[in-house]
């Protein structure tokens, strides 16, 4: 797996794509692979405030339920509703179509605290 | 990979659901070498085994196995085990990995008989070949006629040229075999079983699929459905308790429990609302806390979210509306008949 260079990553296996003061948040390929077959995704509503390092929702696979931690702080401006009916998309395209939420960042500088693709790659190690 | 009682074990290979369905439809291979083995040898081996376990070991014939319980004096579970009668003076117990030292000490502590107890786990690796094509897969590797081994019987024979104990047992609710071999031979035999099952689409299976398969078949998992504070009647395992056999550890407590009646009982449920009731989640009846979930998961075979829970005995019957508290939200569920899955005969 090669992690996209334009995303920033957390050690809790979320990714962020910043564009202006907006950011898209998702979970990584590694996260979905560890979780296995994903059956539910619980996400905040539009308008909700989220905070860097705090739980923003959860993702549940056949095996277990895991919290999703927010990579950045801000206000939710869009939620990927398609994941409610098709959570398995998270297993198929975690870095693309299966993004979770879009956020208007309150502290865009927080992006700088996140890992680069190379740093994240080194963190998760080699994987197929 | 996860650390499981000191063993580095895969939760999944190709994917939990894929592995699960491969076992239901064809054949899967599990490395369950973490399981513990305890041997009891000597003229009074039967007396000890019968005294420490709940099922009637005296009814076993040589070459036969059964499921049984090891209990404390107070009637709670030390462990659940498989007892194999190897010879009149020799028994082979398959026990849970994380309980093996505790089991061994417990059995030794009750040994007032003319026999020797040995923790033999280092001498055995265990592979489970499970699914409708398990027999045809394993048959290619052994001269033993597998169709001649009845369910819950075993044969000491040869697999891939190596001595093996071949037991017609399993923990998946599917037909299959569990084989015990010398650890040094296990990697080679693992590969040979995968090659033999290739025409059936055999897949290696991990702990995740093992758990969902056993849950659908309503087989208990130590630490979940059963533990030191649960007795067999509560766990709906009265069938492994033979109160009419000679005295055994826990018998007095069970007699009292039987006389007074149990207060709680294990019952299956299906989620009706959106969510999965998982181990430890609270169960509500009419909005009030009434019990707890012991295991819960999506059922790949049924396409529903299923689970097991303890409820007050009067309520532990199918058709009761309950709620399960999933991350602080009560979610509707209903108690149902078990097992959730029974293999077609």
Image: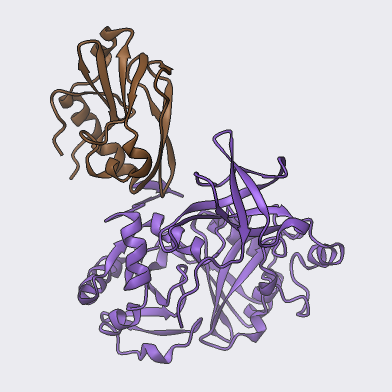
Side of B114 relative to A113 (left or right) = right
**Spot occupied by residue B281 in the image (x, y as percentages of width and height):** 59, 42
Looking at the image, which is closer to me, B256 or A43?
A43
**Spot occupied by residue B296 in the image (x, y as percentages of width and height):** 52, 52
Q: Which chain is brown?
A: A
When the figure is inspected, residue A94 is found, relative to residue B52, above or below; the finding is above
The hue used for chain B is purple
Residue under the point 50% across and 73% down: B342
Residue B59 picture quarter: bottom right
When the figure is inspected, residue B264 is found, relative to residue A114, above or below; the finding is below
Residue under the point 23% across and 44% down: A92
Residue under the point 31% across and 80% down: B138
When the figure is inspected, residue A119 is found, relative to residue B290, above or below; the finding is above
Side of B82 relative to A17 (left or right) = right
**Spot occupied by residue B293 in the image (x, y as percentages of width and height):** 60, 49
Looking at the image, which is closer to me, B333 or B105?
B333
């Amino acid at each position: 797996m090669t992690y996209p260079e334009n995303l920033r990553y957390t050690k809790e296996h979320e990714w962020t794509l910043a564009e202006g003061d907006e950011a898209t948040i998702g979970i990584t390929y590694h996260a979905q692979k560890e979780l296995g077959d994903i059956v539910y995704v619980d996400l905040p509503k539009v308008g909700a405030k989220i905070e860097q390092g705090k739980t923003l929702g959860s993702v549940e696979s056949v095996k277990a339920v895991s919290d999703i931690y927010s990579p950045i702080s801000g206000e939710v401006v869009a939620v990927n509703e398609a994941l409610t009916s098709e959570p398995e998309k998270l297993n198929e395209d975690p870095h693309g179509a299966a993004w979770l939420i879009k956020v208007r960042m309150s502290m865009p500088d927080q992006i700088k605290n996140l890992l680069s693709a190379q740093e994240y790659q080194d963190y998760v190690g080699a994987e197929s | 990979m996860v650390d499981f009682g000191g063993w580095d074990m895969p939760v999944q290979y190709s994917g939990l659901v894929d592995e699960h369905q491969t076992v239901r439809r064809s054949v899967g291979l599990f490395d369950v070498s973490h399981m513990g083995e305890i041997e009891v040898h000597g003229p009074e081996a039967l007396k000890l085994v019968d005294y420490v376990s709940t099922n009637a070991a005296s009814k076993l014939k040589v070459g036969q196995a059964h499921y049984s319980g090891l209990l404390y004096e107070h009637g709670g579970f030390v462990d659940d085990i498989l007892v194999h009668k190897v010879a009149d003076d020799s028994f082979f117990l398959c026990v849970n990995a994380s309980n093996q030292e505790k089991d061994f000490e417990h059995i030794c502590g009750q040994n007032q008989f003319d026999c020797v107890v040995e923790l033999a786990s280092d001498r055995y690796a265990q592979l489970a070949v499970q699914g409708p094509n398990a027999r045809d897969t394993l048959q290619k590797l052994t001269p033993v006629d597998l169709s001649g081994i009845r369910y819950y019987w075993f044969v000491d024979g040869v697999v891939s040229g190596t001595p093996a104990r071949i037991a017609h047992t399993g923990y998946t609710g599917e037909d299959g075999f569990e084989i015990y071999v010398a650890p040094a031979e296990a990697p080679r035999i693992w590969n040979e079983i995968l090659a033999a099952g290739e025409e059936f689409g055999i897949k290696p299976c991990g702990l995740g699929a093992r758990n969902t398969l056993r849950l659908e078949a309503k087989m208990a998992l130590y630490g979940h459905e059963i533990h030191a504070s649960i007795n067999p009647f509560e766990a709906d395992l009265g069938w492994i308790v033979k109160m009419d056999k000679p005295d055994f550890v826990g018998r007095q407590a069970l007699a009292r429990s039987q006389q007074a009646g149990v207060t709680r009982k294990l019952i299956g449920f299906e989620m009706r609302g959106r969510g999965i009731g998982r181990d430890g989640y609270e169960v509500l009846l009419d909005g009030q806390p009434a019990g707890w979930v012991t295991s819960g998961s999506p059922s790949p075979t049924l396409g529903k979210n299923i689970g097991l829970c303890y409820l007050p005995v009067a309520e532990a019957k199918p058709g009761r509306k309950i709620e399960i508290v999933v991350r602080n939200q009560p979610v509707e569920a209903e108690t149902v008949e078990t097992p959730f899955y029974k293999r077609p005969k």
